[in-house]
């Protein structure tokens, strides 16, 4: 043993004493002791004697009275060498390099306490959560130091244990403990693992500030599982936040999870935090997380926990990261329900009370010539609405002012108005437009906030709001096929161009669709369009190829698959064989239908077919999505003119270099 090894061994012994002192102190001040049972409060001298008496004698943590006197199976493990760490890699998703390892504690293989959940449950049953956590930290650090690893290590610790230790023993004791095991503080990341909500956030923030000044980094574990809160993130400002595996599992298939992680990325940029995606188990999920720009990842696909730290991740994961092809992000398949009354134009109109006279009401209408009506309120609560035209027709009659001018306006009130909360969804108000009571269209509706009057709305405004909302929603997801609309199409093209990967842009359009739709009606027309969507999806790799619905009978397919030409030809052929079933038998026998063309002239139209124009997009040929879409549209136009099912244009015909 050389001098350096002797120094490490001596330092380790000293820090074992410090660590055991932490156990002893916490046991005396925080739990029942023999002296407490006899009504005696331990003094600082008792505490000092106790820690000195056992210093350097017992192994780390095993000298705790709770452990020494424990009768349960976990206590037996902690008294011996039953607990050991395994290490799982945390990987940089940009290149597959190993950024760090996380230490995970295991019990004896083949026993009831082999797994982490069983160990945690046993610690709770035996009342040794604090002791168990400390032993886990010590075992992980000791093993990492013995392995001579110079890399970064993540070690789990609860907020409560971290606060207790640092509050009573300070930063220096922690540093001495870490250094004693041969681990550099700057290579240590304390991962806050919460089983309960943090009660004293300010105390934890102070402790974190103290350990951070020593070079130790902080991570939040399982963010999004309900215990790791946004306030905890904001107040502690950890260097790293680990996203709970609920949000990463099957992210390649769930647009809502993808949107959630994109929101977390925005928060991370505000707090200057790096994200770790936990629970990566499939190639598809890894590809999406990589393309989202998540910094680090962890999961079985990258590397399972093992007794020895890994030097390289699993080959299958490395191949995914080196594959330049772009992931196809999942899209919301149905139109968004966003669109509240608050986003529509609410008329901030005056209102009248139950005692308002007809003369006062007429004066208001004369002063506000654009108002279609006025709300009647009882205090702040709306109880009715008065239609302008109906009231003014009555008020303008001969002698009405003299006879009824000073009477209350209640005779003219519709006491069954439509009340709409400002937060109400516009889409849910379509019932107003289709109601049998057409007064809602002429009188409009009253807008409230928490039941209080704030303004009026009209039927015209509602029609505009619903129309605008549906048009905007269709730009994101087509309501007929639920395929991505123009906005996601453009975004995906931009991602492809940015990556530099080669791809093929295909534009598909139906031939003679208008006369078919005119002849058989919108229902069969919709069926034909849905047929195109089904065929396009069935002849695309969902992990590599993107299918979008521009609108009407126009579709965009963005291929990264090598067999794209074969798949396009299959779409053309299968459409021809399937679409014929949507025609009547007479049309099938005749090979088409007689219908009016765009000029109103009746002529014969062959059965509907599909044309696809394809353009190969190479690196730097195009600069934005609009140029790519235009080139594909021109190729589609040429395909229709030449009567070709599939027409492939050379990039030099359309490139914008």
Image (cartoon, rainbow, N blue to C red):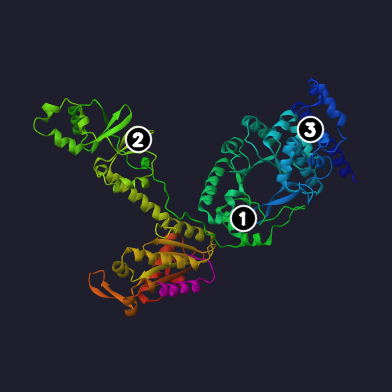
* Mark toward the start of the polypeptide (1 vs 2): 1
**Secondary structure beneath disc 3?**
helix
Placement of 68 over or under 303, stated as above or below: above
Q: Is residue 563 magenta?
A: yes
- Mark 2 nearby-residue class (10 Å; few <14, some 14–19, many ≥20): many
Q: Which residue was labeled with disc 3?
A: 23
User: What is the distance, in whole Å, between disc 1 and disc 2 at their CAs?
Assistant: 51 Å
Taking the view exactly as shown, the residue that stands out farthest to the right is: 1
- Mark 1 nearby-residue class (10 Å; few <14, some 14–19, many ≥20): some
Q: Is residue 497 magenta?
A: no
Magenta-highlighted stretch: main secondary structure?
Answer: helix
Q: Are marks 2 and 3 in contact (CB under 8 Å)?
A: no
**Which residue shows up at 55% across the image and 41% down it?**
270
24 or 15: nearer the viewer: 24
**Which residue shows up at 29% across the image and 47% down it?**
433
Residue 553 figure quarter? bottom left
Q: Which residue was labeled with disc 1?
A: 94
| Residue 284's disc number | none
User: What is the distance, in whole Å, between disc 2 and disc 3 at their CAs?
Assistant: 61 Å
Q: What is the x, y in percent for residue 325?
A: 56, 63
Q: What is the x, y in percent for residue 328?
A: 52, 59
Q: Which residue was labeled with disc 2?
A: 448
Q: Is residue 657 visible?
A: no
Q: Closer to the observer: label 1 or label 2?
A: 2
Q: What is the x, y in percent for residue 461?
A: 29, 44
User: What is the distance, in whole Å, between disc 1 and disc 3 at their CAs?
Assistant: 42 Å
Q: Is residue 165 visible?
A: yes
654 or 102: nearer the viewer: 102
């Amino acid at each position: 043993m050389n001098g350096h090894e002797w120094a490490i061994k001596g330092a380790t012994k000293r820090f074992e004493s410090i660590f055991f002192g932490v156990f002893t102190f916490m046991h005396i001040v925080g739990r029942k002791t023999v002296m407490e049972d006899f009504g005696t409060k331990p003094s600082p001298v008792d505490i000092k004697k106790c820690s000195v008496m056992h210093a350097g004698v017992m192994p780390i943590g095993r000298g705790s009275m709770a452990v020494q006197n424990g009768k349960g199976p976990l206590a037996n493990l902690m008294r011996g060498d039953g607990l050991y760490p395994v290490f799982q890699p945390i990987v940089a998703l940009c290149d597959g390099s190993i950024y760090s390892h996380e230490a995970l504690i295991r019990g004896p293989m083949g026993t009831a306490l082999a797994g982490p959940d069983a160990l945690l449950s046993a610690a709770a049953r035996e009342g040794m959560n604090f002791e168990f956590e400390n032993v886990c930290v010590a075992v992980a650090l000791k093993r990492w130091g013995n392995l001579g690893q110079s890399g970064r290590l993540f070690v789990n610790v609860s907020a409560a244990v971290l606060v207790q230790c640092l509050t009573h023993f300070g930063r220096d004791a922690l540093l001495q403990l870490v250094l004693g095991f041969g681990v550099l503080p700057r290579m240590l990341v304390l991962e806050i693992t919460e089983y309960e909500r943090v009660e004293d956030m300010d105390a934890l923030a102070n402790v974190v500030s103290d350990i951070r000044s020593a070079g130790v980094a902080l991570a939040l574990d399982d963010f999004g599982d309900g215990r790791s809160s946004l306030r905890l993130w904001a107040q502690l400002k950890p260097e790293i936040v680990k996203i709970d595996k609920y949000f990463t599992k099957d992210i390649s298939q769930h647009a809502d999870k993808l949107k959630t992680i994109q929101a977390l990325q925005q928060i991370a940029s505000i707090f200057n935090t790096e994200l770790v995606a936990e629970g990566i188990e499939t190639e598809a999920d890894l590809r999406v997380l990589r393309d989202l720009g998540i910094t680090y990842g962890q999961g079985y696909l990258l590397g399972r926990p093992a007794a020895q730290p890994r030097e390289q991740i699993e080959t299958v994961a490395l191949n995914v990261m080196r594959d330049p092809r772009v992931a196809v992000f999942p899209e919301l398949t149905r139109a968004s329900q966003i669109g509240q009354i608050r986003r529509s134009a609410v008329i901030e109109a005056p209102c009248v009370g139950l005692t308002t006279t007809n003369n006062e009401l007429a004066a208001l209408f004369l002063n506000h010539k654009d108002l279609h009506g006025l709300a009647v309120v009882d205090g702040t609560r709306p109880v009715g609405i008065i239609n302008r035209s109906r009231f003014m027709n009555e008020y303008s009659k001969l002698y009405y002012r003299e006879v009824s001018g000073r009477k209350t306006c209640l005779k003219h009130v519709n006491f069954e108005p439509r009340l709409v909360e400002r937060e109400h969804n516009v889409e849910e108000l379509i019932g107003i437009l289709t109601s049998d009571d057409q007064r809602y269209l002429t009188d409009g509706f009253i807008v409230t906030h928490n039941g209080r009057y704030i303004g009026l709305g009209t039927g015209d405004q509602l029609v505009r709001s619903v129309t605008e909302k549906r048009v905007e929603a269709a730009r994101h997801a087509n309501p007929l096929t639920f395929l991505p609309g123009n906005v996601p199409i453009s975004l995906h093209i931009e991602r492809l161009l940015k990556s530099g990967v080669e791809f093929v842009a295909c534009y598909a359009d139906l031939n003679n669709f208008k006369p078919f739709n005119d002849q058989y009606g919108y229902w069969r027309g919709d069926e034909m369009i849905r047929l195109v969507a089904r065929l396009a999806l069935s002849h695309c790799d969902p992990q590599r190829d993107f299918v979008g619905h521009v609108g009407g009978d126009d579709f965009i397919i963005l291929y990264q698959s090598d067999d794209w030409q074969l798949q396009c030809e299959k779409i053309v052929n299968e459409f021809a064989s399937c679409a014929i079933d949507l025609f009547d038998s007479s049309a099938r026998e005749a090979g088409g239908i007689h219908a009016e063309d765009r000029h109103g002239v009746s002529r014969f139209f062959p059965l509907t077919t599909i044309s696809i124009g394809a353009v190969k997009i190479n690196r730097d040929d195009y600069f934005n999505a609009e140029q790519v879409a235009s080139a594909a549209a021109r190729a589609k136009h040429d395909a229709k003119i030449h009567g070709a099912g599939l027409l492939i244009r050379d990039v030099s015909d359309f490139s914008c270099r």
